Amino acid sequence: MDGDGKPVTILDVARHANVSKSLVSLVMRGAPNVSEERRRAVLKAASDLGYRPNTLARGMRGRTYTIGVLLSDLHNPFFAEVVDGIEEALASSGFRAVLGTGSRDAGREEEAAESMLDLRTEGLILLSPVIPEEKISALSRRVPTVLVGRHPRGGTLDTITGDDLAGAKMAVEHLAGLGHERIAHVSGGPGAGAGQRRRGYEEAMRSLGLGGHVQVAEGSFTDEGGYRGAKRLLEDGLPPTAIFAANDFAAVGVLTALEEVGLSVPEDVSLAGYDNTHLASLRHISLTSVDQPRREMGRLSAGALLNRLADHSARPELRLLAPKLVPRSTTAPLAL
Amino acid sequence: MDGDGKPVTILDVARHANVSKSLVSLVMRGAPNVSEERRRAVLKAASDLGYRPNTLARGMRGRTYTIGVLLSDLHNPFFAEVVDGIEEALASSGFRAVLGTGSRDAGREEEAAESMLDLRTEGLILLSPVIPEEKISALSRRVPTVLVGRHPRGGTLDTITGDDLAGAKMAVEHLAGLGHERIAHVSGGPGAGAGQRRRGYEEAMRSLGLGGHVQVAEGSFTDEGGYRGAKRLLEDGLPPTAIFAANDFAAVGVLTALEEVGLSVPEDVSLAGYDNTHLASLRHISLTSVDQPRREMGRLSAGALLNRLADHSARPELRLLAPKLVPRSTTAPLAL
DNA sequence: CTGAAAGCGCTAACAA
DNA sequence: TTGTTAGCGCTTTCAG
């Protein structure tokens, strides 16, 4: 049934079904005009023989039905779910995905992209790439490309990303809604999206009439960065009663810093993070966080790519996805 | 220099260098006997034209210089570093890696494997696959295959895995060395390696003369599983003074359970995990854990595959890598 | 609606 | 040492 002798080719199928090579070829990719009878015969022969089209041969002459997904960082759990969404969307499309990773190094990322192109992937999905803008444009000129999790300056690319500005506002509004006024922010430094989150924080504070309480400590998207940022925050006289950290890792760092100075969460200080990673949902941590629809980001990006593959001339589109606040145990009403 | 007109073929290079196709072909893959002069000319022409061999065409006739890496679970941070190791080892080999993922579903994992084989990957690295043993053997008969993080019953495969038995013993010995006797274990249930870790725990307890204190609660490789296991443990009269959890996630669950009943770590109970993931190193958690040389696992697996690719007849080898205990803040001497 | 034939870019005999 | 010549398995005109 399965056998691992020499691979069965289109010719074998043709002979088995008493037709010519080309007829098989036509049938194999849903031909428009083939008699129902022959089609059946071919399909039967193919499955009898366990025929699988040779992707390489196919690719040489035309299509590979393969798209490349470039992960900037395999370590970031954020992407795993995006990839799940991509695969979900691809499942019934006849396309397959291959993944590559740049290990958050621009050079290797570029190599990885070239490598996928070598394999003749018909399209590319770039997940928060770190390579410079021009490189991305160059790639997108060679092959349909979708950018995820990063804003292109140019805007000549299909782009799917979370609305970090809105998400940050949600976090601040949640905190303010609990009665907090001295709400500080530990930023994400140079991280992708960190700028937007910071701006969202500042704008929200101002529009809530809390502009006088704006207080930002430089941090990063890591445990360590959050810890240091919070430390600095806590040295300056009156501590805030609530802190919005740029992501969950930073939030956990803030948590540590608060514990060290004897402040408890949420009794003394409320704390919110961003990204709603598994970290946030750990019961030991149970961090209020802002969720991004990761899976949907994946689905949409694959969908956009498929569209573009079908209609090469479609206009590039920018989709900003709405985040959602997930309240947990680290935020509570301001104690009087 | 780069231009994105039609791709340049071997024929273009040949014309540009005034030689024949085959000479170029020879040179391109480090021919043994070509005059230095021509070789130079060809190489120059190639780089002038920006020639890149067409992997597909190459693959049809022979080699693809591509290996497939199958991740059972993109979400598990354990694998990210293994992949780093693989890429490191591949970097100078002329081989490239493409990744696939099964999203911890046997069916999709199998599809992913077929997909890579379609692409004519010359070898496969399977990272803690969930597909059944026979499928793995079947794959390994079609193409050189290296198994990582899982013990093959048959042993007809190159296999790289951590020595979970030894690692568990280390954890127990560490705890015992701190004066603990009532050391309990929250198991990893059906997780890969969980059985070995449990056995290691039991054996160590016995050989330390602590056989009478053996106490195992069924858990899983998740936060939730650890929480439930610990809860059960704590219902049974005298609580243990130390707990060894099957992995870091479970350990964090245990932490939560301990907190809930008012036991503090490490004052009342010492706690050790396994895998030394980023979770363990978070300052807020700072969990004593057992480290596996993930990056080296990756390097070795790629090395093994490269070897086998070079010498098809090499004997399958089983490498058991030594783990290492990383003491942190959750373990302390037994309080009197 | 079906079949024959010509390549896609490359490698691998085989000649020269 | 170098050039010539067949294909690898498939898609795709172009005739029947």
Image: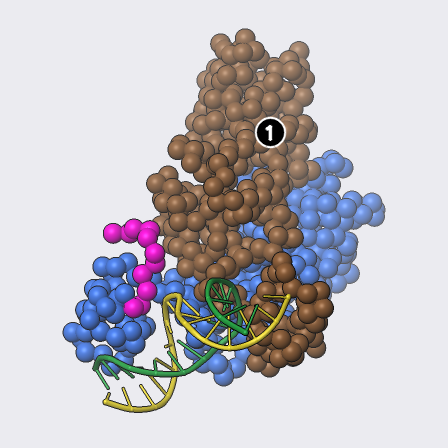
Chain colours: A brown, B blue, C yellow, D green
- Majority secondary structure of magenta residues: loop
| Residue drawn where x is 72% and y is 53% of the image | B220
The x and y percentages for residue A48 are 69, 75
Query: Is B312 on the left or on the right of A295, as rendered?
Result: left
Query: In the image shown, does A254 or A309 lie closer to the viewer?
Result: A309
Res B316 visible: yes
Q: Which residues are the magenta region?
A: B1-11
- Report if residue B141 lies within the magenta region: no
Query: Is B209 on the left or on the right of B75, as rendered?
Result: right
Indicate the quadrant containing the C terminus of chain A: top left, top right, bottom left or bottom right. top right
Query: In the image shown, does A232 or A293 lie closer to the viewer?
Result: A293
Indicate the quadrant containing the N terminus of chain A: top left, top right, bottom left or bottom right. bottom right
| Residue drawn where x is 63% and y is 60% of the image | A33
Q: Is residue A173 above or below residue B252?
A: above
Q: Chain of mark 1?
A: A
- Report if residue B7 lies within the magenta region: yes
Q: Is residue B177 above or below residue A205?
A: below
Query: In the image shown, does B286 or B139 lie closer to the viewer?
Result: B139
Q: What residue does disc 1 label?
A: A322
Q: Amino acid at mark 1?
A: Ala
| Residue drawn where x is 45% and y is 38% of the image | A157
Q: Is residue A271 above or below residue B218?
A: above
The x and y percentages for residue A329 are 68, 28
Res B67 visible: no
Q: Within the image, what quadrant is residue B53 found in?
A: bottom left
The x and y percentages for residue A59 are 48, 63
Q: Report how many numbered discs are placed on residues in the image.
A: 1
| Residue drawn where x is 40% and y is 32% of the image | A153
The x and y percentages for residue A99 are 51, 54
Give the secondary structure at mark 1: loop
Q: Residues within 10 Å of mark 1 (few under 14, many from 20)?
A: some
